Structures are given as structure tokens and as C-alpha cells.
Image (tube, coloured by chain):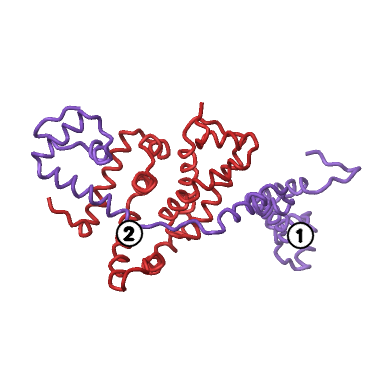
Amino acid sequence: MKAPGSDEAEMLRLKAGDASAFARLVERYRGPVVHFLYRMVGDAATAEELAQEVFVRVYTARRRYRPRAKFSTWLFKIATNLALNRLRDSRLARRLQAASEEEVASHLADPALNIEQQLIEQERRAAIRQAVESLPEKQRLAVLLHKYQELDYAEIAAILGCSESALKSLLFRAYEALRAKLRPLLGVRV
Amino acid sequence: MNMKANEHLREAQVIPYLDGRLAASERVAVESHLESCLECRTQVAELRRLLEVLEEWPAAEPSASFAAELQRRLDAAAQPASWWGRLQVRPIYAGALAVVLAAAALITLWPPSQPEPVEPAQVASLEAEGVGEEDLAPVEPVLLENYELLREFDILFEAPPAKEKKKL
């Protein structure tokens, strides 16, 4: 039995024809899905378009829905597949490579900071973004789903199609690579 | 899981330790090891800091028109598409149509063979030897096969005459 407000219960309501259940799921997940897709494809407009497509697919598949796995696992699996398909479009990949880090960083700059602070913050963000983007595809997905989406190990393993123990090693290797790349930002004294 | 005193942390242990997801006995073993191993202690401290630093990378937020745009897309998806719309939605159909049109154009515009110009006098002398004009056309066997194939293929796209119905 699913809890009344759970994602799976909402999907079952949607399956039964309750459109308001879909609106609640969109409200609950549009932020996380856009965040994930933005960090995957590196472009806000593309992330928004892909997120819309994710929800269109959820809605279209509502009558076939079976609550076998967590809804969020299914949702992020759809988002992952759409993002990977888009990234494999070489035109977008080239455009992303050519995209100005400065432009992206200034878009996200905090207006409360002075210019010098903003520049430092932009540089740190650009370094983090570049480090994550340089990870192999599976490691990058694992980091985004673990660190930024905070999915549990079982969900991430299901999305990536690996065992939980393999995922833990994958995450370790990904974070080790990031630790090496971002050491100047860490400033740790043991 | 027990750890030997001289054994470093295992790959699959480190991140669950930082996430607070190790079983109590394993966590105690890890912490005991960290007290005595500077290398692992440094690694864990840096990874813990890394997980904080990664939070500095913000993501774009959904636009204010997200829900309205989604509704528009759902409404569009619910509309029955015209036959032309379906072709636009499914590129495979457009591709198939392009192939069919190309084949039709090929049959119409590309003769199966180009006979070499033959001087009338030469024809006259060859006819005298019992050689017909068709035999003069230099036809590559493979091209001819393809042409026949395309001719047959063409039948598929034309309504056969009511009386002279060809057998396929």
C-alpha cells in the first residue's frame, strides 16, 4: 500500500484520470529535473526543453504505469536517457565546448557580492563545472544523481544499470578525480 | 566489516562513510583506522570538503512559464496529427518518402543505358548483318538488373491498369 501523498500514489491517481495528481508531481519534481538536466547539458534552455519532454513522457505513459520501482528512479532514468541522447548529438556537444564559461558564470553571479568577490566566485564555479564535465559519462551521472539530486544508492544503481557495490566504487573514483582536479579549492589542513 | 590495522579504507567504504551510511560496526572500524593513518585521514578530510565545495555550483531554475508551456505541449500531443504532421513528427516517414521520390525520379530521368551515337551508315551495315539496334546499346549487366528491379519497384506505386493487370 502506497502512502497517500507518495509519488507512486499520485501516479496511480493520474493513471485513474486525476489530472491534479500530475500537476502535483510536476510541481514536486520540475526543479530537481531541471537542475539535473542543466548540470548534464550545461544550457538552461536545453535543460528546460528536455525537462518538459520528461514530463510529457510521464504523462503519455500514465496508463501503462506500474509502481514496481520508486517514481523518482523512473523519472530520472527518463531524464538521463534524454540528456545522453541530446549530448550525443555532436552539434550540441561542439556548442557546449565552445560555450563561454564567463557567460554562464555571469548569468549565475550573486549581485550582493562586489566585483572582485564575483570574479573569484565565478572562477570557482567554472572550475567546479569544468571538473565535473571532464568526468567520464557514467561517473558524471553518478555524481550528479548522488551529490546534487541526493538519490539513494539503490536508485542510482538502478538508473545506471550497475550493482550498489559497483556504484560505491564508481562514486569513489569520481570523487577522487574531482579531489585531484579541485585541490586548490579545498584548502584542507589535517 | 572488520579492518586490519595496516589496511587502508576500501573504495566502496569511503563514500558511504562520508554519507553516514555504514553499519555501526564498520563505521567504528573505519574511524579507528583513520586515527592511525594520516594518508586515509587526509583523503577523507579532502573528500568531505570536496562535497561541500561542489555545492557552490548552482543550477538553472525552471522558468516561470514552465507549467504553461508543459500544458501547451500536452495539448498539442493530444491533438490528432494530420498526415503531414505525422510525417514531420516521425522523421523515418519523411526519410522513406524521400527514398521513394528519389527512386521515382531515377526511373523517370535516368535512362537504363545510353546508346553510343551510331552513324546511320554503320547501322545500315550492321542491320545487313542481322544485328538489331537494341544490341548496339552497351548495357552493363548489373545496371540492367538494377533497372529491372526499379521497374518492378515502380509497379508498387502505380495503380495497375484494370484490364492488363501485371502479375507480381
Q: What amino acid is at disc 1?
A: Leu
Q: Are marks 1 and 2 in contact (CB under 8 Å)?
A: no
Q: Chain of mark 2?
A: A
Q: CA distance from mark 1 to mark 2?
A: 78 Å
**Residue highlighted by disc 2:** A130
Mark 1 nearby-residue class (10 Å; few <14, some 14–19, many ≥20): some
Q: Which chain's colour is purple?
A: B
Can you name the residue that lies furthest to the bottom here?
A115
Looking at the image, is mark 1 or mark 2 nearer the viewer? 2
- Whole-percent x and y of residue B23? 25, 30
Note whether residue A26 is visible: yes
Tell me: B80 left or right of A187.
Answer: right
Foreground: A81 or B4?
B4
Q: Are marks 1 and 2 on the same chain?
A: no
Q: Which chain's colour is red?
A: A
- Whole-percent x and y of residue A110? 36, 66
Identify the residue at horizontal 29%, vertical 47% (top origin): A174
- Whole-percent x and y of residue B62? 49, 56
Q: Quadrant of residue B60?
A: bottom left
**Residue highlighted by disc 1:** B126
Q: Is residue A127 above or below residue A26?
A: below
Tell me: A88 left or right of A177.
Answer: right
